[in-house]
Amino acid sequence: MSAPKRASLIAASMILMTAAMPACAAPKVTKHVNVTVDARSTNAVKRMAWWHQAKFGMFIHWGLYAVPAGTYDGKQIPSIGEWIMNTGKIPVATYADYAKKFNPTKFDADTWVSIAKAAGMKYIVMTAKHHDGFGMYHSEVDPYNIYDATQFKRDPIAEMAAACKKQGIRFGVYYSQSQDWHHPGGGAFGGHWDTAQDGDYDKYLANIALPQVKELVTRYKPSVVWFDTPVDMTPERAAPFVDIFEQHPDIIVNNRLGGGFAGDTETPEQNIPPTGFPGRDWETCMTINDTWGYKSYDTNFKSTETLLTNLIDIASKGGNYLLNVGPDATGVIPQPEVDRLAEVGKWLKVNGEAVYGTTVSPFRKLPFEGRCISKGSSLYLAVFHWPSGGLTLPYVHTELKRATALAGGQKLTASTAADGTISIEQPAVIDPIATVVKLEFVSKPEVVVPVVYASPGADGAYHLGAADADLHGGVQVEHDPANVGYWTDSNSTVTWNVDVPADGQYTVGVTYACDNGSAGSTYKVGLDDGASVEGKVDGTGSWGDYKTVTLDGKVTLTVGRHLLRVTPTSMPHGAVMNLREVTFTPTTVD
């Protein structure tokens, strides 16, 4: 996945990343393409049915890079393990020699699948070929693979597919279609560093990538094909791959093929979008430590609490969690990863109904530390820390039948006030990570959240933050501190409701970030009736470097309630900005 940690991904939804993508990516380079709706959308409901139920999957990054394990020429190579060939600029022939040392005799597919199943995972996606070009299956297209190039003489992809089928787990494959640092002509982030890599990119696609994808699809019949880093992919180059999946309508394909192919799933990497992807299926892929491929000295494993709260958070926003493990060169998943997965599985064995088959929460904010997850006529409250003042849930205008603690099945006393606020008794048993309360209603719960109007602060100014904004179009609130990102459609707008106690004039301040390559957009800030001031987005260095500017002119606000809006007026380079805050500061009062 990505090499250096990705900056704020304003364009992740509609902009395909050439280097900031999963298990697979490197420093951020963004290519802007027009995302099209493919003909496969007609089969999407059937294709995605099992995936919507699954919610939790295992990503496996395993390949030749497990042999150097993060060290080359006696030095620890920075960045992620599977990128060592690129980051260390290892010559093609030198890297290929690692195959002579690769003999993972401890690999056991049944054990790996059992680990995933015990963790409560419902599907597995494994690397069939990563950017290093080494096949982890017996390919008849090219001999640079684990069967033909090593003494192992086995086909791990075939064994994993069989083990998954036996244990009732869906199986998918990851394939690096564009970057290939071994085969002549293959793409390479940052360019080639060895003349052995030089060649014709289209011949590489035609002779290696395309036939290997056909081989994987027809031989192993995966439920998922996971592409990555579409360097130099165009609609014309992507079309033959799309044709394959037209013939296999049950295969789920992600959004990283390139060439404008939308795919079935959005793929945020190493982060959880605060508002998910309304209208799109999505899956956060994330490492269990800091690398995708094995590095012997990376022991920064996420805690069980972090893994579980991530899973709960993702489920509450309607997504799936694809959590990565990186086996070593002997074929063993590191024990700390196994231990944490087992602990997650224990929690899911008790509370899994609050995760599997669920959908997005009807609440934007909650009055307690935790998450709400929806399923049919029930709501599940995953409470991270039980509030000292008692657990309440506001704005629910449907009759409550019962409240139950999932752990132990204790029936809880619950009462509903006239305004729709439900008060719930504390269970006898509190889970140290997340206590789940199931609320069952007579029908699908109706949640009516009243409009919140912002008032001026003690300084008389309105401080309108991204977390409080209403979003229109494809924009999303992301990251901490919150910002409005994914702003890749000039028709998307951001609004706030404000309550003005007295007439006055205001100057407008805007706090934003913008990568230098995407600068130049223009926008206006003001009232819905057209009174506004205008601004231009300058480059701030990166999507994570923020600055505050004061726009020329003033806006008059009159007594009453108003809708304040930020509207793009031009977007010459594919993205507007990452917007953190808009401030209205009074200058004079009539």
Image (cartoon, rainbow, N blue to C red):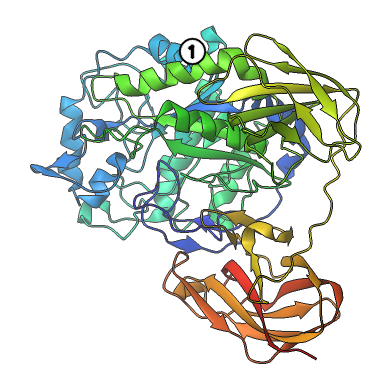
Q: Residues within 10 Å of mark 1 (few under 14, many from 20)?
A: some
Q: Nearer the viewer, residue 387 or 486?
A: 387
Q: Is residue 470 above or below residue 519?
A: above
At 29% from the left edge and 45% from the top edge, which residue is drawn? 83
Q: Nearer the viewer, residue 12 or 523?
A: 523
Q: Position of residue 287 (x, y in %)?
A: 40, 36
Q: Position of residue 332 (x, y in %)?
A: 29, 18
Give the quarter of the image for residue 114. top left
**In the shown orientation, is residue 432 left or right of residue 102?**
right
Quadrant of the snapshot with the N terminus? top left
**In the shown orientation, is residue 420 left or right of residue 305?**
right
Q: Is residue 376 visible?
A: yes
Q: Which residue is tagged 1?
A: 118
Quadrant of the snapshot with the C terminus? bottom right
Give the quarter of the image for residue 193. bottom left
At 56% from the left edge and 58% from the top edge, which residue is drawn? 15
Q: Nearer the viewer, residue 14 or 284?
A: 284
Q: Is residue 148 above or below residue 27?
A: above
Q: Position of residue 120 (x, y in %)?
A: 54, 17
Q: Position of residue 35 (x, y in %)?
A: 64, 56
Q: Is residue 34 visible?
A: no
Q: Secondary structure at mark 1?
A: helix
Q: Nearer the viewer, residue 31 or 472?
A: 472
**In the shown orientation, is residue 566 left or right of residue 218?**
right
| Residue type highlighted by circle 1 | Ala
Give the quarter of the image for residue 485. bottom right
At 45% from the left edge and 17% from the top edge, which residue is drawn? 343
Q: Is residue 138 above or below residue 194?
A: above
At 26% from the left edge and 25% from the top edge, which residue is drawn? 328
